[in-house]
Amino acid sequence: MGARESLLQRALRIAILPPDELTRVNEPGKTRRKSMPAGQRFAMVVSALTLLALPATAAILTPDEHGFGTHQQLGLPPCTFYVVFQRPCPACGMTTAWAWLLRGEIGHALAANAGGTLLAGLDLVAAAWLLVSALRGQWFPGRPSQWMIAAVAGLVGMVTAGQWVWRLLTF
């Protein structure tokens, strides 16, 4: 985009991904990163705790034997896409996948929804990473790039879409 800053870049700069700032240490030629501001560290802890609420909820659910429908234990209605088309939607089985994964049943979790399994694993890693980074006052091991975030989101999307197409063809 040249010298102009994109909307995403501006939002990330303002929110939780400020540019790395370096400060001189007493020894010439050596630098170290500044500690994050307290507000940013607090936001990271709140984000991590929010991410941990999802697996905590999934842990109290009993995975549905059909591979989808576990979300109904939370009082949610059946999948509208499934009710209308009698075919699973891309998200069918995600809650079930989380519930299976938290029981250590990776095979069942992948069968329920591979994208959901990947998302649950990433959720746990991201929560731990945010907590460690907040406690250290610096991104550990480094600040995430926009490309890395986009690549991970793209991977989850492709896995979910791929499994959905497979389900539609074999349903």
Image (cartoon, rainbow, N blue to C red):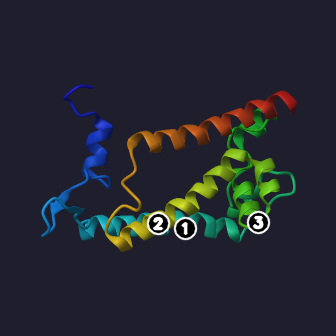
Quadrant containing the C terminus is top right
Task: Tell which circle, 2 or 3, labels the residue nearer the N-terminal end.
Answer: 2
- Distance of mark 2 from mark 3, alpha carbons? 22 Å
27 and 148: which one is in front?
A: 27
- At horizontal 67% and vertical 45% (from top left) the residue drawn is 115
Residue 84 occupies which quadrant of the picture?
Answer: top right
Q: In this image, 39 relative to 144: left or right? A: left
- At horizontal 25% and vertical 50% (from top left) the residue drawn is 19
Can you tell which of label 3 and label 1 is closer to the viewer? 3
Q: Looking at this rendering, what residue extends furthest in the front direction?
A: 28
Q: In this image, 23 relative to 49: left or right? A: left
Task: Tell which circle, 3 or 1, labels the residue nearer the N-terminal end.
Answer: 1
CB under 8 Å between discs 3 and 1: no
Q: Three-letter amino acid code at disc 2?
A: Ala
The kind of secondary structure element at disc 1 is helix
Query: Which residue is label 3 attached to?
Result: 104
Q: Three-letter amino acid code at disc 1?
A: Leu
Mark number for residue 48? 2
- Distance of mark 3 from mark 1, alpha carbons? 17 Å
The kind of secondary structure element at disc 2 is helix
Query: Percent position (x, y) of residue 155?
Result: 59, 39
Q: Three-letter amino acid code at disc 3?
A: Gly
The kind of secondary structure element at disc 3 is loop
Mark number for residue 52? 1
- Distance of mark 2 from mark 1, alpha carbons? 6 Å
Q: Is residue 50 visible?
A: no
Quadrant containing the N terminus is top left
